């Protein structure tokens, strides 16, 4: 579909009807990438004061937390003063969603459930204006890759298993002018079908998980197929983009590769510009590095606009390094030099098929969304025929939940694999401090 037609008939009408005034915010986001550092900090401080005061006045969780630590949002004089505020974790969000969230905003809020990269499924709410701002920051950043709102997209992503979920995804894809490709069905046969589909659909860009896009690219190169003529750029997400993966993808599509970094709780965090720098979405988020040395450390984020479930100094569970050097592109948005963690593994099936680890996450998200039966999980593939699930249960865990989890894994992953559920008190992390949610030992 033509980009302008997609914008005017589907995207803008659909988002405005949901209460997301994207057309009215977008010009401000395009302009703010060029403002000076001091002006950007003033903008951050203004909205930081507003969100911390709002949380204190409307959320019993934050009111009690701030008072416990002797914090008064009115004392904020600079963005650096935020460091005096306490840090919250995924566990805080999971256990205190009701008291952390502001009920009067739920009527204009969407709920989001995400497995994240730490194995702790979390749910939260995001109000319409905050969602609109997130989409504006993303749209601005995609322009760095030559992509405009409404450009046709070939998307390697999750495909819902339920009929209702599939219909909802199809409607969203229509609004976004994209073809969704299953990231979980990766065979030579399906890759050939995806290639033929791409030639007919003529996507302007390709978007998806690094490992799946790389496999598609390798298939094109190995079979001597011509690059897809319509593709102008590739945007990868959710996993670490290695130099090797970037090279393979770029060669196969004869296009520049742009990386993005984000999480379900706050959305877009950083995007790669045309000069290769990962710029933080600093007009939506305030990102800190928790490090005594001021170098590499755990990333802590404050969402400046989400009033439905305010996230103030929220630990992401990822590690990174902020750069003090400005980018040659001239944008004032801060640069993050490296992001550590999120090391996923592909699951191998006895049939030879490969399954993306996000397929596993979808199963656990489904269980947690309906039953809220565990605190954390990790999946370890011991052999082609056996997978161990290390799981920390909560008080809602039962034998019925146990059976449903195994049934869903056999249904969605493979019925030729034995799934052993191992109930544990804790799950070990990697030396980096990250937890590998999906590990493959074979």
Image (cartoon, grey):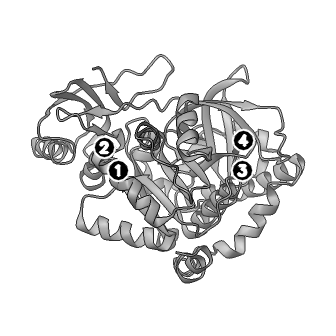
Cα separation between marks 1 and 2: 6 Å
Q: Nearer the viewer, mark 3 or mark 4?
A: 4
Q: Position of residue 355 (x, y in %)?
A: 30, 40
Q: Position of residue 262 (x, y in %)?
A: 56, 46
Residue picked out by circle 3: 73
Quadrant of the image for the C terminus? Answer: top left
Give the residue displayed 56% in from the left and 57% down from the top: 229
- Counting residues from the start of the chain, the first of labels 4 and 2 encountered is 4
Residue picked out by circle 4: 82
Q: From this viewpoint, is residue 125 visible?
A: no
Cα separation between marks 4 and 2: 51 Å
Cα separation between marks 3 and 4: 9 Å
Q: Nearer the viewer, mark 4 or mark 1?
A: 1
Residue picked out by circle 2: 188
| Residue sitting nearer the eye, 232 or 379 | 232
CB contact under 8 Å: marks 4 and 1: no
Cα separation between marks 3 and 1: 57 Å
Q: Nearer the viewer, mark 3 or mark 1?
A: 1
| Residue sitting nearer the eye, 322 or 227 | 227
Q: Secondary structure at mark 3?
A: helix
Q: Is residue 56 above or below residue 88?
A: below
Q: Secondary structure at mark 1?
A: helix
Residue picked out by circle 1: 192
Give the residue displayed 59% in from the left and 37% down from the top: 87
Give the residue displayed 44% in from the left and 59% down from the top: 198
Q: Secondary structure at mark 4?
A: helix
Mark 2 neighbour density, 10 Å: few (under 14) some (14–19) many (20 or more): few
- Counting residues from the start of the chain, the first of labels 4 and 1 encountered is 4
């Amino acid at each position: 579909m033509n980009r302008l037609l997609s914008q005017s008939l589907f995207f803008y009408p659909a988002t405005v009807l949901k209460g997301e005034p994207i057309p009215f915010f977008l010009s401000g986001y395009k302009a703010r990438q060029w403002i000076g550092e001091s002006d950007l900090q003033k903008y951050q401080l203004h909205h930081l004061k507003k969100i911390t005061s709002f949380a204190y006045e409307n959320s019993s969780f934050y009111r009690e937390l701030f008072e416990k630590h002797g914090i008064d949002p009115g004392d904020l004089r600079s963005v650096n003063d935020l460091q005096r505020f306490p840090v919250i974790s995924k566990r805080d969000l999971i256990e205190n969603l009701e008291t952390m969230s502001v009920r009067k905003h739920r009527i204009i809020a969407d709920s989001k459930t995400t497995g994240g990269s730490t194995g702790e499924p979390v749910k939260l709410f995001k109000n319409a204006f905050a969602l609109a701002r997130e989409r504006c920051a993303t749209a601005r950043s995609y322009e760095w890759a030559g992509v405009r709102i409404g450009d046709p997209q070939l998307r390697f992503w999750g495909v819902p298993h339920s009929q209702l979920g599939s219909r909802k995804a199809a409607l969203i894809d229509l609004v976004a002018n994209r073809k969704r490709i299953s990231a979980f069905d990766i065979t030579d046969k399906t890759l050939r079908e995806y290639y033929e589909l791409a030639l007919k659909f003529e996507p302007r860009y390709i978007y998806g998980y690094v490992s799946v896009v790389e496999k598609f690219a390798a298939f094109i190169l190995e079979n001597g197929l011509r690059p897809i003529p319509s593709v102008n750029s590739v945007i990868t997400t959710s996993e670490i983009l290695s130099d090797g993966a970037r090279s393979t993808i770029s060669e196969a599509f004869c296009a520049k590769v742009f990386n993005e970094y984000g999480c379900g709780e706050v959305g877009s965090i950083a995007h790669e510009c045309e000069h290769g720098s990962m710029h933080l979405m600093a007009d939506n988020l305030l990102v800190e590095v928790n490090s005594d040395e001021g170098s590499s450390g755990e990333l802590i984020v404050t969402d400046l606009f989400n009033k439905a479930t305010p996230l103030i100094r929220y630990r992401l569970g990822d590690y990174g390094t902020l750069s003090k050097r400005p980018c040659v592109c001239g944008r004032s948005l801060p640069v993050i030099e490296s992001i550590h963690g999120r090391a996923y593994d592909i699951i191998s099936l006895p049939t030879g098929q490969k399954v993306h680890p996000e397929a596993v996450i979808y199963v656990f998200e489904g269980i947690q969304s309906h039953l809220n039966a565990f605190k954390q999980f990790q999946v370890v593939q011991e052999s082609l025929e056996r997978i161990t699930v290390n799981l920390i249960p909560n008080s809602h865990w039962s034998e019925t939940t146990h059976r449903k989890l195994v049934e869903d894994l056999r249904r969605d992953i493979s019925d030729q694999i034995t799934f052993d559920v191992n109930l544990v008190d804790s799950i070990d992390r990697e030396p980096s401090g990250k937890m590998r949610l999906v590990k493959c030992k074979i």
